[in-house]
Amino acid sequence: MEKISADNFPDRYKPKPVKEVSHQQLTIVVVNSVFETLLPDLATVEFKAWYCGAIYKLRPPKILEMADMARKGKEPRKLFSALIMGELKSRGL
C-alpha cells in the first residue's frame, strides 16, 4: 500500500497556518483606557467590569473594530453589546 503524504492533497485539505497571537499580558491601564474611549456613546460605568472583561478577553483591536461597526448602527449601545456577546459566545468565552 502506498503511503499518503500531505503533498497528495489539494490545498483546501492542508492544515492552515496558525496566526501568531500576542501572549503579552494586557495591563489594567490599557484596558481602562480602551474602556474610557467607549464611555460617551457605547458603554456605561454601571457595567464597567463586564466591558473590561470583554476587552481583556477579546483584545483591544477587536473591541475597537466592533465599536466602529456599532457606531454606524441605529442604536449603537445595544448593537455594541450584542456584538460583544456574540463574539464571546462564538469563541466559547
Image (cartoon, rainbow, N blue to C red):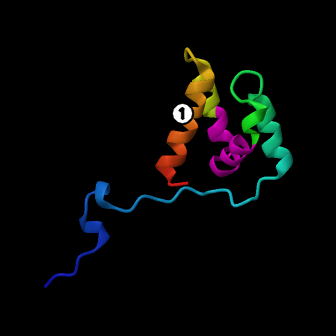
**What type is the residue that disc 1 sits on?**
Ala
In the picture provided, is 65 more to the left or to the right than 8? right
Residue at position x 65%, y 51% from top? 57
Q: Tell me which corner region of the image, top left, top right, bottom left or bottom right, holds residue 9.
A: bottom left
Above or below residue 9? Residue 82 is: above
46 shown above or below 17: above
26 lies above or below 72: below
Q: Please tell me whether residue 53 belongs to the stretch shown in magenta.
A: yes
**Image quadrant where one finds the C terminus:** bottom right
Residue 43 is situated, as x and y percent measured from the top left of the image, at: 71, 30
- Residue under the image location 62 percent in, 40 percent down: 62
Q: Is residue 5 left or right of residue 1?
A: right
Q: Which residue is mark 1?
A: 82
- Coordinates of residue 10 in the picture (x, y in percent): 26, 58
Outermost residue toward the right?
29
Q: Quadrant of the N terminus?
A: bottom left
Residue located 69% across and 44% down the image: 50
Q: Position of residue 67 (x, y in %)?
A: 64, 29
Residue depicted at x 71% and y 21%: 41
Dot 1 falls on a residue whose secondary structure is helix
Instruction: Quadrant for residue 72, please give it.
Output: top right
The x and y percentages for residue 82 are 54, 33
Q: Nearer the viewer, residue 73 or 19?
A: 73
For disc 1, the neighbor class at 10 Å (few under 14, some 14 to 19, many from 20) is: some
Nearer to us in this view, 46 or 3: 46
Q: Which residues are magenta?
A: 49-64
